[in-house]
Structures are given as C-alpha cells and as structure tokens.
Image: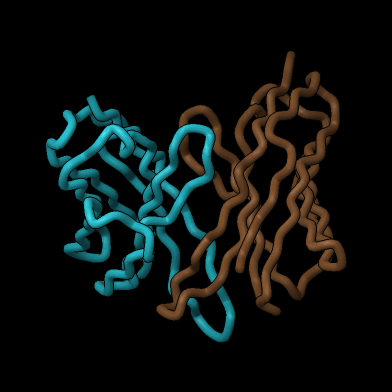
C-alpha cells in the first residue's frame, strides 16, 4: 500500500563519510522532490527532478547531489556529511502540471532521519 | 515573494475541545494553491487538504474544517472534538508553479498540537 517509500528510516554516518538515501514510488509520478527538515523547522526544498531533468535550489550546498535512474527511484547523495547535515530527509512526488496553473499535491514518504557522528 | 506564517508555535487542548490553527500567507501570484499537512511523531507528512485561490468555499471533512479568506490572506484549520490521535505538528503551505511544471511548496514553521486525554 505504501506509495512513497524511503530507505533506510534511520541512518547513522560518520563525519565526512559519504551516505546515500533512497526513495521509491509506486505512483508513477513525473516529479520527485527532496526536502531537508531540521529539528523543529519547516521542510526545505533541496532539489527536484522533473522526469530526468534535475533542478537544484539556489541555496542547496554542493555537498548534496541526486540521481534518478528511472521514474520509480531517486537517490540523495551527501558527499561529505557535516554535523549540520543531521536532519530528517523527506522525499515527495507529484504529477506534472497538467494544464494552465493546475498544480498537484505532493505526497511524502516517511522520511529518513540522518545522524552524523 | 512567497511567505507562510503560522503564529502559533504550540497549542495544548484537552480532548474533545475544538481548536483552530491559524495560517496567513503572502504571495504576488493571482493563482496559487494552499495546503495543510499533518506530521505525526513518526515523521511522515500526511496530506490533508488542497485549496486553489479561486475557490473560497469552506470545506468540512469529518471533524476537520477549513476557512479560506482571500480578503485577509488566511487559511485556517479547525479540528472539532479533538482526539489524542490529532496530536502532531501541522504545516500550512503555499505552492507556486515552477517553470518546469513542478510545484514549489513554501511551508510555514508549523504548529505543534498536543491533545491531552
């Protein structure tokens, strides 16, 4: 039944050790998003994929990268995690804008909580 | 620029009381969408409602109701007869349509609701 799946749910890594977070979806949505949510803060968009096109937010650090090998999967790579990267990482999906200003709902996965030691 | 303000950081109510969560937004767009999401302790963001800027009708879904007033740029959320399971952080969000056709969601800082048995 799960529509947006994130693995693992909890990830512990060491300072500077690369880590990859995974997201998959069964909704066949064109668009996939990655958000970072720090404790007691609102989610912040890092980037999104519109089909295979990658769109980075202007203030997303270079340390964060993403891959989308197919429609169903999207990965978040943190090349050299720092203590400040400890957060919940949320993946979301939506359909593309169908016409005019129609905008569709984003459906979120359960998140991966990243701890950096 | 898009902005969403949720002035109430935390609210506590006793079970069965009604509670209203406030949301005020700013946008220069004439067409936009507003959302409410629920984030329980498990971390997943659960979609509750979407409202477009042309539809000011209030909506009721079970114990939940939403009051959208364009004149005051507000989109308030009321829970009637609150239950312990309603305890969560609630986010109001505003979307703009990205040039790619994806949606950029701007979240408020959230309101933590605690329902006391």
Q: Is residue B82 left or right of residue A5?
A: right
Q: Is residue A42 left or right of residue B62?
A: left
Residue at image position (20%, 60%) is A67
Chain painted in cyan in the figure: A
| Residue B100 seen by the camera | yes
Quadrant housing the C terminus of chain B = top right
Q: Is residue A15 left or right of residue B13?
A: left
| Residue A3 seen by the camera | no
Residue at image position (57%, 52%) is B107
Name, please, the residue furthest toward the top: B117
In the figure, the shade used to draw chain B is brown
Residue at image position (37%, 65%) is A58
Nearest the eye: B91 or B17: B91
Q: Is residue B46 above or below residue A15?
A: below
Horizontal and vertical percent for residue B101? 45, 77
Quarter occupied by residue B8: top right
Horizontal and vertical percent for residue A63? 22, 51
Horizontal and vertical percent for residue A105? 53, 62
Q: Is residue A54 above or below residue B117?
A: below
Q: Is residue B112 above or below residue A6?
A: above
Q: Is residue B31 above or below residue B66?
A: below
């Amino acid at each position: 039944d799960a529509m947006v799946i994130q693995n693992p749910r909890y990830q512990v890594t060491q300072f500077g050790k690369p880590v990859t977070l995974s997201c998959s979806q069964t909704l066949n949505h064109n668009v996939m998003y990655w958000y970072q949510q720090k404790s007691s803060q609102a989610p912040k968009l890092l980037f999104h994929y519109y089909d295979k096109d990658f769109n980075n937010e202007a203030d997303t650090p270079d340390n964060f990268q993403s891959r989308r090998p197919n429609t169903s999967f999207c990965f978040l790579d943190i090349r050299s995690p720092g203590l400040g990267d400890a957060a919940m990482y949320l993946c979301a999906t939506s359909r593309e804008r169908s016409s005019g200003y129609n905008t569709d709902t984003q459906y979120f996965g359960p998140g991966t909580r990243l701890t950096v030691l | 620029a898009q902005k969403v303000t949720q002035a109430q950081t935390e609210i506590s109510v006793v079970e069965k009381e009604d509670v209203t969560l406030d949301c005020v937004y700013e946008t220069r767009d004439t067409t936009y969408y507003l959302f409410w999401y629920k984030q329980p302790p498990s971390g997943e963001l659960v979609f509750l409602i979407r409202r477009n800027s042309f539809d000011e009708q209030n909506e009721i879904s079970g114990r939940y109701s939403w009051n959208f007033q364009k004149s005051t740029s507000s989109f308030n959320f009321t829970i009637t007869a609150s239950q312990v399971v309603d305890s969560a952080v609630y986010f109001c969000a505003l979307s703009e349509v990205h040039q790619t056709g994806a949606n950029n969601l701007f979240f408020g800082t959230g309101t933590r609701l605690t329902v006391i048995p």
